[in-house]
Image (cartoon, grey):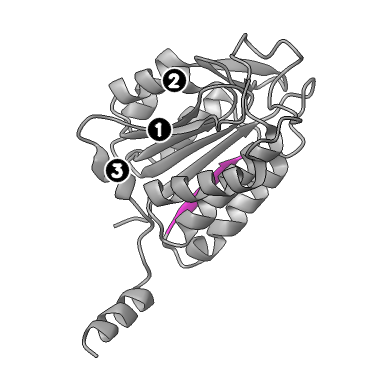
Amino acid sequence: MSAPVLFFAFADDSNDPLNLLKRERRNIKAALRIHERDNKVQVEVEPGVSIEELYEVTRAYSDEIAIFHYGGHAGDTILRVESEDGGNEYAHAEGLAKHLGAQASLKLVFLNGCATKGWVEALLDNGVPAVIATSVEIEDKMATEFAEQFYKEISNYASIKRSFDTATRFVETRYKGKKDITVRTRGEQGWFGQPKKEDDSLPWSLYVADDSDAALEWKLPESRVIKEVELSLIHI
């Protein structure tokens, strides 16, 4: 059986750069490196993803991708991606949700951009078992730390649900009640008119399709060494 593929797609905007997007990409990759070295997972990272690259990677790893992660500017039904000519364009939910839903191995779509909740219904309706999305605009540093904590837990063989809960507790510990934040969005009026954050509640939620609760328990395959140690402890 081939190792599960984790596909990380990032896109920036030269007119409205996200200063911590590179850190998010680097630290997620670092958290998973030990498993990639042991061939327990394959990490595919596109630092300036285009629509063409979204389709190329999913075609290359058809029915092998377990997690799809997007980091960058987003809106209710669009993701900001980079175009082949070096500019930017939008990936729209209607087509991409259908395409991701056709990936039989997919367990989770994690959309780490502003106000991505509008994607949830389309993704779940098209067969994606679980989605992490945001209800309002998100702060750049908080978004980076949330993703880092989530994938550190995934790297530690935690389930999707436990990893989400840990990441949530981390940002609650650091940011609860903090108002003076810079959001991962464009301008004072917001980007694409997404709702503004008006209180200290966290914007991330974990959504699951009907009869797909088992996806929340997905975790990285443990190494043979770890399994042998566990079995030896059972027989002591």
Instruction: Give amino acid for label 1.
Output: Val
Closer-to-camera residue (50/27): 27
Closer-to-camera residue (198/73): 198
Image side of residue 33 versus residue 1, left or right:
right
What residue is pinned by disc 2?
119
Question: Quick check: is 155 in the magenta stretch?
Answer: no
Q: Position of residue 65 (x, y in %)?
A: 39, 42
Instruction: Give amino acid for label 3.
Output: Ala
In three-dimensional space, the C-alpha distance between marks 2 and 1, rounded to whole angstroms, equals 9 Å
Quadrant assignment for the C terminus: bottom left
Mark 2 in CB contact with mark 1 (< 8 angstroms): yes
The disc placed on residue 40 is none
- Stretch in magenta: 41-46
The disc placed on residue 215 is 3
Quadrant assignment for the N terminus: bottom left
Instruction: Give amino acid for label 2.
Output: Trp
Residue drawn at 34 percent across, 40 percent down = 107
| Other-residue count near label 3 (Cα within 10 Å), few / some / many at <14 / 14–19 / ≥20 | many
Mark 1 in CB contact with mark 3 (< 8 angstroms): no
Closer-to-camera residue (66/201): 201
Q: Earlier in the sequence, mark 1 or mark 3?
A: 1
